[in-house]
Amino acid sequence: MEILSTVLPFIFSLIIIAPFSGNYIYKVLDGQKHFMLPIFGKPEKGIYKLASVNPSQSMDWKSYCSALLMFNFLGFVILFILLLTQQWLPLNPQHVSNMSWHTAFNTSISFVTNTNWQSYAGETGLSYLSQMAGLSVQNFVSAATGIAVFTALVRGITGQTVKSIGNFWVDLTRSVLYILLPLSIIWAVLLAGEGVVQNIHPYVEATTLEGANQIIPQGPAASQIAIKQLGTNGGGFFNTNSAHPMENPTPFSNFLELFAILLIPVSLTFTYGKMVKSSKQGWTIFTAMFILFSAGLVISLYSEYQSPEIWENISYMEGKETRNGIAASVLWSEATTAASSGSVNAMHDSLSPLSGMVAMINIMIGEVIFGGVGAGMYGMIIFVILTVFIAGLMVGRTPEFLGKKIETFEIKMCMLAVLAPAIVILIFSAIACCIPAGLSGLNNAGPHGLSEILYAFSSAAGNNGSAFAGLNVNTIFYNVLTAAGMLTGRFGIIIPVLAIAGNMGQKKITPVSQGTFRTDSWLFVALLITIILIVGGLTFFPALSLGPVAEYFLLQNGTLF
């Protein structure tokens, strides 16, 4: 009953609401009239005027990419300086000191890349100014960057003999003003109503019933939590993230935060269908994502409720969200790793071996099971192109996707996007396993210790941000190496995606014929899932065998690490 009452309402709510929100997002990105235009239309024009941007100016993929990289680099510099000087700046009632250079470096890259990996404790490591003017701002613009890249890719696929893939500044501005900002305001109000703290007061000293002194953290939490969930960012205002009662106090706040993680990523599948003028295409991608999501959820739930006989078949409660139950913790772990959010309401280090492996695989296959805002969709389209290409080879036809021929350049870019994060995960994990700096922070030995390292670099390269939490990563070694992984996992995919958009936009659209391979059928769904698991999953099978798989079999004999 716990599973049914937790999982089914959540899934039904998503399936019902996502098509409507997807249609609204389509109108925003396509520049059509919508109900938010009277509210934010003038501010949008004001932003273009202030930034000296011509919204009617089109960009080719190189100009679009240059603007994107410049904007993100500037955001990194500003945030880095802010974190290094926060103790001398206002809105710091707890007198939080400046961050060390390597933690500030890691944190700045983390939030710019929509990863939100945390090497710091939120309530003790950041001032209110850093949280609001630094992290919250990046939560908005990093998510908007993902939506912009997705939009540019679809324009390139659907355009005919055009060099333009849109205007980055327009896509970024509209994504923030009309999508992320209104939803964040609604969610922040709802969360504050549930008791999530939202103020700029100093921390409160309280006396417990036992007579001990306790510090109760305060701060503008609800506003940041809203956008961290909606933008699939995931960085917690407090150190324990959504397991903290000030950040997630009630079952309804738990539902709201969990729902927010998947709302936009799921909606974008239907936005995609609208943009390519075929709702079936959107439903096809949604179906593939949903099947993978459901399979991982079922495996995780089974694993958490069925322990080995040597443990008397008890459920794994250690490290779980005891207020809402095991099902809520497992659903969150599946959603947050499928959507590259990284927020948690339980400790992933406490997951059973199979549940931990599912969470890891969700990240390793490229965060394409719904994925990050925008990023999940352009990652999935990469696999769609690969599937069309492989299917074309199997039947001896020139592969085509939505009337565009898939040629050598597209496949090279696709493989670059697939291999970039995989190289980071495997090589960086191998380095960490071989040197004292990589092993010094482990809390566990054996296969579980390997899983902690694998998960850390998977989370960084997949721009997820969650952690097994059994590994001390606030060291120069891990801060620098995971930062490099985040940059590679973000821009090592974005640049090839924009190159594909630019190249495909210049091609002619071939009319559909009897020989055209359909990409909106159940057969294609099966092929797409197969390619994702083979190309994206088998790369990591040897490493997973030494980590969670080995731990699973050892656990059957009562061996813990």
Image (cartoon, rainbow, N blue to C red):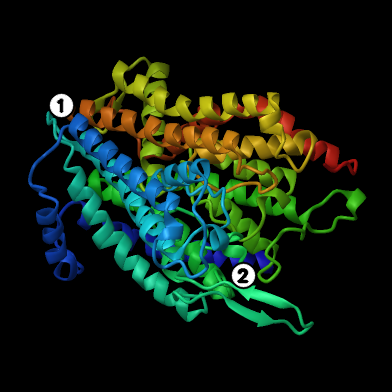
Q: Is residue 467 above or below residue 60?
A: below
Mark earlier in primary sequence (2, 1)? 2
Can you give x and y, in whole percent of width and height, for residue 233 in the image? 45, 53
Secondary structure, mark 2, is helix
With 524 as the anchor, is 315 left or right in this view? right
Q: Is residue 201 above or below residue 372?
A: below
Amino acid type at image mark 2: Ser
Can you give x and y, in whole percent of width and height, for residue 214 in the image? 68, 75
**Marks 2 and 1 close (CB-CB < 8 Å):** no
With 68 as the anchor, is 207 left or right in this view? right
Q: Quadrant of the C terminus?
A: top right
Residue found at x 22% / y 55%: 174
Residue found at x 15% / y 54%: 31
Residue 5 tag number: 2
Can you give x and y, in whole percent of width and height, for residue 394 in the image? 42, 18
Can you give x and y, in whole percent of width and height, for residue 207 in the image? 70, 83
With 26 as the anchor, is 322 left or right in this view? right
Q: Quadrant of residue 292?
A: top right
Q: CA distance from mark 2 to mark 1?
A: 50 Å
- The outermost residue toward the bottom is 209
Residue density around tag 1, few if under 14, some if 14–19, many if 20 or more, within 10 Å: some
Secondary structure, mark 1, is loop
Q: Quadrant of residue 262?
A: bottom left
Q: Quadrant of residue 528?
A: top left
Confirm whether residue 26 shows in the render: no
The residue lying toward the viewer, choosing from 201 and 321, is 201
Residue found at x 42% / y 32%: 383
The residue lying toward the viewer, choosing from 119 and 513, is 119
Q: Which residue is mark 1?
A: 508
Amino acid type at image mark 1: Lys
Residue found at x 57% / y 63%: 242
